[in-house]
Amino acid sequence: MGAVTIDGLPPPDLPEVAFAGRSNVGKSSLINGLTNRKGLARASNAPGRTREVNFFVLDGRLRLVDLPGYGFARASRGEVKKFQNLGRDYLRGRVNLKRAYLLIDARHGLKEVDGEALSAFDTAAVSYQIVLTKADKLKASEVEAVTQRTLAAIAKRPAAFPRVIATSAEKGLGMAELRAEILAACEA
């Protein structure tokens, strides 16, 4: 289901994990990879395609939440602000949110706009973990380097979970590890 306003969110009766990140970082593709279902979350090459908070119930036990991206989107400024504020409001007020996963494109690493997201998570006291996407596009040594830089950047952030997972939705890299992290977060 999708919600375009906070009033449209489902009741907080299941544990939830949310996926946040810049537009086109691969949030929908990652959800498809995690669930082994290609068309579950609509992925697009056009930035800003996700314009609502989308919920996917897994086996009646937990919800995966696909949040609108931040940064560039092919939409009017008013529309962009509306769906990005919806994502922020969701993160601030969801009592059953167990962890947010901030997706970062491994090819680019953390950018200034991601720093704003990290600060928002810290201020809202939302536990979050960094997931590097598109890691298959880099050599193993480059993935290790961006992982270490990312760990160093989040080391003193109060809400950051101190582990970074490198993934590739296309190749399946890191999916089993991320599934295990999600289950552990939901059971805690």
Image (cartoon, rainbow, N blue to C red):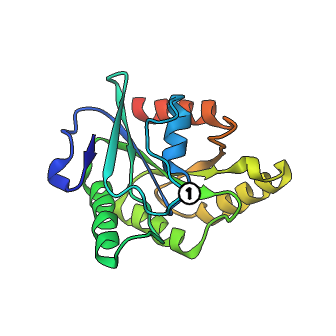
- The residue sitting at 42% across, 58% down in the picture is 49
- The residue sitting at 20% across, 56% down in the picture is 5
One can see residue 108 in this view: yes
One can see residue 181 in this view: no
43 w.r.t. 39: above or below: below
Q: In the rendering, at what x and y percent does residue 142 appear?
A: 81, 56
Q: In the rendering, at what x and y percent does residue 149 appear?
A: 71, 63
Tag 1: residue type? Val
64 w.r.t. 103: above or below: above
Mark 1 Cα shell of 10 Å, populated few (<14), some (14-19), many (≥20): many
- The residue sitting at 71% across, 61% down in the picture is 107
Q: Relative to residue 73, is residue 181 drawn left or right?
A: right
Q: Quadrant of residue 63?
A: top left
From the viewer's side, name the closer residue of 37 and 162. Answer: 37
- The residue sitting at 37% across, 66% down in the picture is 123
Position of the C terminus, as image quadrant, is top left
Name the residue that disc number 1 marks: 25
